Image (tube, rainbow, N blue to C red):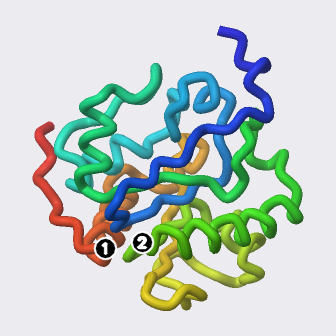
């Protein structure tokens, strides 16, 4: 598969109704653009973290796209996924500060249209730039959206090696509980 041909492509947002928890990535990878599934890169720990936290009942394996069971698992639990910037790049650091700031406006429109209980931006650096909060830390933030809580979660990318799976699962589980999602014991 030639990933370069997917440069600039978009991955459709996953926005179930009702939407309880909206995860917000930085932007799609070329792999995600090729498969049509968010966080599908082979080194990304997003789905193992969701499963370990008990947010999903089975381990989603999105490397080749979502199965019908994977989509049903996410949507039945009210879990959505979007990105600050919709276009795929090889690396998130290719985005400009302006693109990330524009992404905040895009996210505001999505929140207004779908009213999730909780928004979780995945990645502190992108959050700091997009929201103009240079000293923000992970965890709950002051939300600009009435009725929607805002969190920043550690990035599950394999490049974020200083966060263990257990640490990530703990943080993501806290966010899911804030959204009213009943956590399930992991089956591994």
Give the tally of numbered discs.
2
Q: Earlier in the sequence, mark 2 or mark 1?
A: 2
Q: In the rendered view, would you say 28 is above or below 147?
A: above
Locate residue 81, reporting x and y percent: 48, 52
Taking the spot 45% from the left edge, 74% from the top edge, the residue there is 115
Of the pair 131 and 15, the residue shown nearer to us: 15
Question: Element under label 1?
Answer: loop
Locate residue 4, reporting x and y percent: 78, 20
Q: Is residue 32 left or right of residue 100?
A: left
* The quadrant where residue 71 appears: top left
* The quadrant where residue 9 appears: top right
Locate residue 65, reporting x and y percent: 45, 25
Q: Is residue 36 left or right of residue 55?
A: right
Q: Which residue is mark 2?
A: 116
Taking the spot 30% from the left edge, 67% from the top edge, the residue there is 176
- Distance, label 2 to label 1, CA atoms, is 8 Å
The numbered dot on residue 179 is 1
Q: In the rendered view, would you say 15 is above or below 22?
A: above
* Mark 2 touches mark 1? (CB < 8 Å): yes
The numbered dot on residue 125 is none
Q: Residue furthest top?
A: 1
Q: What quarter of the picture does the N terminus occupy?
A: top right
Q: From where the camera sits, is residue 134 visible?
A: no
Of the pair 169 and 22, the residue shown nearer to us: 22
Q: From where the camera sits, is residue 57 visible?
A: yes
Taking the spot 55% from the left edge, 53% from the top edge, the residue there is 82
Q: Residues within 10 Å of mark 2 (few under 14, many from 20)?
A: many
């Amino acid at each position: 598969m030639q990933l370069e041909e997917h440069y600039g492509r978009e991955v459709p947002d996953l926005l179930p109704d009702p939407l309880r928890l909206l995860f917000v990535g930085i932007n799609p990878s070329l792999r995600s653009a090729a498969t049509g599934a968010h966080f599908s890169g082979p080194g990304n720990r997003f789905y193992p973290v969701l499963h370990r936290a008990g947010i999903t009942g089975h381990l989603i394996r999105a490397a080749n796209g979502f199965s019908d069971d994977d989509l049903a698992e996410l949507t039945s639990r009210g879990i959505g996924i979007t990105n600050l910037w919709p276009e795929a790049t090889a690396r998130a650091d290719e985005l400009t500060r302006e693109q990330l700031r524009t992404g905040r406006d895009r996210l505001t429109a999505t929140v207004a249209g779908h009213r999730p209980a909780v928004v979780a931006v995945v990645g502190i650096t992108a959050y700091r730039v997009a929201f103009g909060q240079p000293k923000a830390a992970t965890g709950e933030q002051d939300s600009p959206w009435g009725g929607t809580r805002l969190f920043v979660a550690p990035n599950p990318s394999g490049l974020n090696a200083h966060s263990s799976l257990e640490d990530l699962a703990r943080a993501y589980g806290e966010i899911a509980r804030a959204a009213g999602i009943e956590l399930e014991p992991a089956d591994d």
